[in-house]
Amino acid sequence: MLTIGELAGLAGTTVRAVRHYHRIGLLPEPPRDRSGYRRYGAAALIRLLRVRRLRELGLALDRIGELLDGPEPALHEALDALDAELAAQAERIAAQREHLARLRAQSPDPDLPEPLAAMFAKAAADGAPARAIAKEKELLLLDLALHPERTDAIVAEYVGMFERLVQRTDYAELAHRFDALADVDADPATVDALAVELAAVIRAEHAAGDRTRGAWNPLAETLMTDWGSTMPPSQRRVMERAVELVADLF
Amino acid sequence: MLTIGELAGLAGTTVRAVRHYHRIGLLPEPPRDRSGYRRYGAAALIRLLRVRRLRELGLALDRIGELLDGPEPALHEALDALDAELAAQAERIAAQREHLARLRAQSPDPDLPEPLAAMFAKAAADGAPARAIAKEKELLLLDLALHPERTDAIVAEYVGMFERLVQRTDYAELAHRFDALADVDADPATVDALAVELAAVIRAEHAAGDRTRGAWNPLAETLMTDWGSTMPPSQRRVMERAVELVADLF
DNA sequence: CTTGACCCTGACGCAAGGTCAGGGTCGCAG
DNA sequence: CTGCGACCCTGACCTTGCGTCAGGGTCAAG
C-alpha cells in the first residue's frame, strides 16, 4: 500500500495538500500501519485524482466535496456556474487592462478624468513647474472627493478655468514665480506684487464666473482650510493677501 | 477635522480598510482627539485617495506603499508589470474556459484524453452498463497515474483494445452479464461460463498483442491488486477463474 | 550506529480586509 | 438629566489553499 508521499506523487500534488484534504474531509482518513503512517489503496488514489482534476479546472474545494458525493448532473451545473464565473473574471480583467492602457497612453498620472489629464499634460508641456501641478492635482482630488455627485460639473469648471487662464495670462510664468516662493522667505514687496497679480486673476475669473459651487459643506470647509495650511509660509502669505484684496467679491 | 468614518466615506472605502492601512504602515497614524478618536486632515485624504486608486487598478498594498514613497518612474514600471500579470491571468482563464468548453461539448466525464472520452461515449451509446464503464475509467485513471510518461502509449493501447473488442464480440452484452454479477452471489456454473468467455477475449487480445507494458513497478503491482480486491465477490471469482484459464500465456 | 529520507502532529503565515465582542463617546431628543 | 442611536476604540478570529517551519518518530541502507 502507498505512503502519503507516493500517493501525492502519483496524483501530481503534494503531501501537504493531501493532509489538507483529510482535514477538511474531502478525502477519508485511510488506515494506519503499525507505526502510525497513513496507508492508501487504489480507491484513495482514484478519489484524489478526481479531486485534483476538478481543482485544476478551478473549482473550490468545498464544491468539489459536494460534487464527488452528490449526483452526477450537479457536476454539469457546477461547470456551468464555474464557466460563468470565469467569464465574469475575464471581463473584469479586460476592463482593468483597458483602463491601464488608457492611463498609460495619456497621462503621466493615473486615473484623473480624461479632460483633466489632458489639461495637466498641457500645463506641463507649457512649462508649469511640476510641484505646482502636483498641488493643483491635490486640490482637484479633494474637490472631487468632497462632491462625488458633481464630478462632471467640477471637471467642466476646472477645464473652463484653465482655458481662460491660458488666454488671459502667461500662467506658466506666474506659476513659476509662485512656486519659487516655496523655498524662500520672501520679502513683503515680492509677496504683495504677486498677490496683486493673483487678485486680478481671481477677479477676472469671478467676472467670467460659472461657479455653481453647490452645497456648502462643513467638511469641505475644514478640509480646504487644512489643505491651505500645508502651504509653505511665503506662499500662504501671498494667498492671504490676495484674498484680502478680493474680499469685496464675496 | 475628519473622523475615520468620514474619511473612509470620502475615499469610497470602509473604516476597517483604513485601520488596516494604518496597521501595515501604508497610511501614517493621524493625531487623536481628547477622546482617543483619530482625526484626519486633507493630506491624509489625499494619500488615501491615491491608495484607493492604485488598489482599484489591482496593485497589491505593499507595492502601493513602495510606489507612493518612491520615485515616479517606478509607478510606470509597476503598471507595466501589472499589465503583464493581468495578461497572464487572462490567458490562464481563457485556457481554462476552453478546456471547460471542450469537456462539456464532448464527454460526460471531465478531462480524459479525447480519444478515450469518445471511446467511453461510444460504449455508453452501445448500451454498456454505466457501472462497468465507471470501473473501466477507474482502471484507466490508475494506469495513467502510474505511468505518466507513457500517456500516449496507454491511450493508444486502450483505444486499440476497444476497437478490436467491438469487432470481435458483442462486448456490450458481455459487459452486461458481468455487471449483473455485482448484485448477486452467482453459482459456479455461471461463473465458469463467463470466465471461459473472458479467457477467450484475453487470449485473442494477447494474440493481437501490442503490449509494451513497460517498466514493471512495485507500486503498480500493489495498486492493481488492491483495486481488484474492491470488486464484488462474484465478479472477482470470475476474474480469478479467467486468469487461471490463461495462465499459460504469461 | 549513523545518516538521509520519509512520516507524524501542531501551529503560524499569506492578502485584504470582514465580522464579531466588549466597551467608550458624541450629539440630539424628550 | 437621561436615553438612544450612531459613531469610535482595541483585540481577536475568519476566509482560501495550502507552504513552511518546529520538534520528534520511523525506515532502509551503509
Image (cartoon, coloured by chain):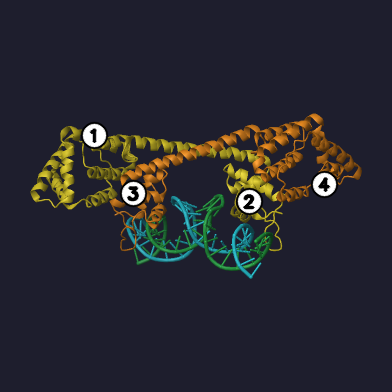
Chain colours: A yellow, B orange, C cyan, D green
Q: Which of marks 1 and 3 is in front?
A: 3
Q: Which residue lies furthest to the left in this view?
A: A189
Q: Nearer the viewer, mark 3 or mark 4?
A: 4
Q: Which of marks 4 and 1 is in front?
A: 4
| Residue on which disc 1 sits | A160
Q: Do the residues labelled 3 and 4 touch (CB within 8 Å)?
A: no
Q: Earlier in the sequence, mark 1 or mark 2?
A: 2
Count residues near mark 4 (Cα–Cα under 10 Å), then give few for <14, some for 14-19, many for 20+. Answer: some
| Foreground pick, D14 / A146 | D14
Residue flagged by tag 4: what amino acid is it?
Answer: Arg
Q: Is B140 on the left-hand or right-hand side of C11?
A: right
Assign a secondary structure to mark 1.
Answer: helix
Name the subunit of mark 1.
Answer: A
| Residue on which disc 4 sits | B236
Q: Are marks 4 and 2 in contact (CB under 8 Å)?
A: no
Find the distance from the CA under tag 3 to the CA under tag 4: 70 Å
Image position, residue A220 (x, y; %): 27, 48
Mark number for residue A8? 2
Residue flagged by tag 1: what amino acid is it?
Answer: Gly
Name the subunit of mark 3.
Answer: B
Find the distance from the CA under tag 1 to the CA under tag 2: 67 Å
